[in-house]
Image (cartoon, coloured by chain):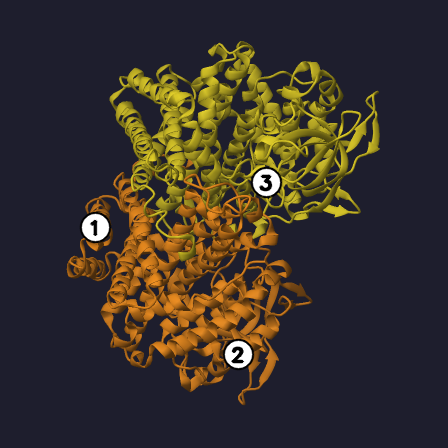
Chain colours: A yellow, B orange
Amino acid sequence: MPSFTSPTKDTQFVLHDVLNIQESGIPGFDELERDFTGAVLTEAGKVADNVLHPLNVVGDKEGCRLENGVVYTPTGFKEAFEQMKEGGWTGLDMPEEFGGQNMPYVIGTAVGEYFSAANQAFTMYQGLTHGAASAILAHGTDAQKATYLPNMVSCEWTGTMNLTEPHCGTDLGLMRTKAELQEDGSYKISGQKIFISSGEHDMAENIIHLVLAKVPGGPEGIKGVSLFIVPKFLVNEDGSLGARNGATVGNIEEKMGIHGNSTCVMNYDEATGYLLGDLNKGMRAMFTMMNEARLGVAMQGLAQAEAAYQNALIYAKDRLQGRDVTGVKNPEGPADPLIVHPDIRRNLMDQKSFAEGARAFVLWGATMIDKAHRSEDKDADGLISLLTPVLKGFLTDKGYDMTVQAQQVYGGHGYIEEWGMSQYTRDARIAMIYEGANGVQALDLVGRKLAQDGGKHVMAFFELVKNFCKENADISEDYAKDFIDPLKSASKDLQAAGMFFMQNGMKNPNHALAGSNDFMHMFGHVCLGLMWAMMAKSAQAALDAGTTDADFYTTKIATGRYYMARQLCSTKLHLARIETGADTVMALDAEQF
Amino acid sequence: MPSFTSPTKDTQFVLHDVLNIQESGIPGFDELERDFTGAVLTEAGKVADNVLHPLNVVGDKEGCRLENGVVYTPTGFKEAFEQMKEGGWTGLDMPEEFGGQNMPYVIGTAVGEYFSAANQAFTMYQGLTHGAASAILAHGTDAQKATYLPNMVSCEWTGTMNLTEPHCGTDLGLMRTKAELQEDGSYKISGQKIFISSGEHDMAENIIHLVLAKVPGGPEGIKGVSLFIVPKFLVNEDGSLGARNGATVGNIEEKMGIHGNSTCVMNYDEATGYLLGDLNKGMRAMFTMMNEARLGVAMQGLAQAEAAYQNALIYAKDRLQGRDVTGVKNPEGPADPLIVHPDIRRNLMDQKSFAEGARAFVLWGATMIDKAHRSEDKDADGLISLLTPVLKGFLTDKGYDMTVQAQQVYGGHGYIEEWGMSQYTRDARIAMIYEGANGVQALDLVGRKLAQDGGKHVMAFFELVKNFCKENADISEDYAKDFIDPLKSASKDLQAAGMFFMQNGMKNPNHALAGSNDFMHMFGHVCLGLMWAMMAKSAQAALDAGTTDADFYTTKIATGRYYMARQLCSTKLHLARIETGADTVMALDAEQF
């Protein structure tokens, strides 16, 4: 059985030593004292480590069960859900007026990492609820907010997002689900939705489905899509539950992982629905929270990598196999621990440098979302919109790879379910797919975000990197050589790729799109390079100030050096690929394959 | 439900157009006429496509079941196994004297690819038998051969390999299983072995376990390990089955994949065993067939990638989603097929260029094994020994990655078990682990094979690449630019990495070992680059000769161009990493992690 300990110390380091959140000037952030966030993170960590983590394997083994229209969640989930509700964890970053605690999104994200790492399938029940509640908060009428939000913030009622249909996922313009206007202003919703996470279950008394559908006679394609609130039980005027609505689970999917979450086929049969936001503006309403939702998935990539890494590390220190070629390290034992071997070390350093870099990247992104919302800062909004596909695509691709590497440390024991490492891989796989498959993220980045507002945001990103390099080049010779130089070089590669797209994408957009996946990855590397340069700077400052915890900070710098030397250089390969353009990619006709 | 068609045409192309096997001068190869191998491959393909493939999903879903010491294989496996036996497929490359068909190893490998692609878990039952039979063939006494081989060649009896114990996998010197000499010259074997593929099942009347164990009082560690034949049922002098031996299944493991194969905990309780080969030379006996066994696993990496790719391609042509940005391709339909999108194309071309390149690499390697055995060619033996860890490590790592990419083409449908893409990923994962985890392959390559016989074999490899480039530089300007130049450049990177190891590994072996994984991968890329250069040359020759199948050959060249432009350049990244040495990899003490 795997173990898990929430990395609170590392989160605190990022929030306070690196991002200096308290001094960031974002409204409300001045209250985020080190002791306060420490207390929140510690309490959240206890829930993650002691309540959610022990149910992770249980959820994987038991899965969800559909019987006569009722979905039963795995043993212990219900009780744990009660504890989440009692602890107030479900409404951490929701407005006080609806029962939330009004904390910044960055704190919700920090805590969410622990919950996801401890039990991703479980945490999705409240994650989807959070997403649905956010959409109602942004687009609902006062009456809708009053009707649904208090119970959703507390997770008395949970929520879902219904986009996908059997024949359309990315291309939602093909949608067939219908919404017919009734005399009372409500709609009758009919159609089938698939892959509905937390679609039906036994942990809440009501489920509020947000459903995309088309009103007949409206505009063609995606421009005729509207968003509807479709409660499982209709809600009476007094707030009590009324009639059972025509929203039923048709099936629960057997999946590669996240077995503890009920992924449902949902059938809507003249179900009563209420328009949320404007008619035919459903996509906009659904995607208002897109940056948050995608950053949440990016965080899942990090979370699974962190959890898998912790276990791989324990195993590498514990398992005795072979001898250190440079000299026996464990003379009393029959062999040395795995961790003496350079290739095991390489594997672990990949994982460690990824997880810590990704944590900084995710939390940095979350503060931008807070800044955009709380300060109504358009530049922050533009920058996080640019970085969202990078966060989502890069961190979930790499997060998955890291779970595979963690599994590899275990040899054969990594392949059998008993040790739990297979589950990290299987669970992490979904994050590359949902909330926009990573190919779509790359397309969004290169086809849309790069040129947004005349390329203003990508220029701002390069400026930010450039200024950081300029301002910190003199910290020390070592720092300049180990951190600033590689960051500059990688950033130059990224700019060269952008230039290639500009020069060649005009002639043929495929010259840009054929390089979109490589561009997303090289952008991710530059962001992690920047994070490591920032973290190393902060760690050096702490050392210079005579910290009593020198080991933590020297380890941090050494881990950063690894990333800069061994990972950041990936930008060269990505650039080389991009610069070959679309010719070899598109050379074959479809029939020639 | 996924589909599968054995790629016989492509195998024929590699065997005859590229490797020119009939003219290779290897004893017996002159009989391998194009029509003959075509007939064998076609018949094997029918078995793979129509008998084994339909049971692949069945095996995954049902798995194996242990009841009262009996292991039941999934529905249909028994009948399919009978068909394999009746068709003579189990002894294809075994000596006629024991009932085999005496074909070269390369034909066994070509056919094995189809069987593995169609159903890896099933094919392992005969694969392990083949391995055990090969060890008896190489090291058994005449009496042992006569007793066991006829029934093993026909798969009336199956075989297993017992190496791993709970506390040791790679480091078999730690082994605890004991073998005590009896008065009659036999041994009593006691101990526990784990991860024993095909360890117990209901498809054969006897199972011949090959078990590594230590004779008490022998040399310490790995030098005191011997190999024993431990039949499930003892065999009487007349060949009939005698007493049940003390070799019993303790448990079957729940695994991430290959559910159709029974992975057993085997308990040996004073089981009667017979020494195979020399006392205390068990590792040598077990590993005589190592190149073959590891090439067989390399082939599995290719096989799963091929099967997954075939399905991803069908889906990409079939699924309508979005529009081609350069102009609508399917105006009658509601959307264009996925395959119009550049990033989907990039994904498919990665898979296609890998699978076809890997097929050539595997078959090329197999001919070297034939040459080494049939011609007793020491150079061929040296070269294949060098390339074995590259084949195994690179092709299974990449093969796995390709199954993940194939799964990604399906979006959400790739994650649910109904479509079968998750199984390819889960099944492919094991090949990176068993038969020596890929980190051990990298260590074998850099720590042992590079310097073997004074570095003679790696020099021979570079010479081979150099000569190929020299001899074919004048085919055409395009060919030189698209194939020869990138191959030269990648080979130069590989040599530079080898040079770095030589110059720095003396001071500290960790400078070489920290780069071992990168070196294995860059070596793999150079090999696939060489394969593509060879294939493109052959394809061009066919076109120049006025082939009637121009489409096949032009597609081949275009696919090769993709690999050379987009994949081979990976050597640059690997070299950059290697040249950072061990400093950042080994910077932390174990306690600092």
Judge whether residue A53 can be spotted in this image.
yes
Above or below B53: residue A36: above
Q: Residue at x 27, y 40 (%)?
A: B576
Left or right: residue B295 compared with residue B378 = right
Above or below B152: residue B177: above
Q: Callout 3 environment at 10 Å: few (<14), some (14 to 19), or many (20+)?
A: many
Above or below A108: residue B580: below
Counting from the top left corner in percent of width and height, residue A204 is at: 75, 32
Image quadrant where one finds the C terminus of chain B: top left
Residue B479: quadrant of the picture: bottom left
Host chain of mark 1 = B
Host chain of mark 2 = B
Left or right: residue B76 compared with residue B566 = right
Which residue was labeled with disc 1? Answer: B481
Counting from the top left corner in percent of width and height, residue B247 is at: 58, 70
Image quadrant where one finds the N terminus of chain B: bottom right
Which residue was labeled with disc 3? Answer: A174
Q: Are marks 3 and 1 on the same chain?
A: no
Judge whether residue B209 can be spotted in this image.
no
Q: In the structure shown, which secondary structural element does the residue marked by tag 1 occupy?
A: helix
The disc labelled 2 sits on which kind of residue? Lys
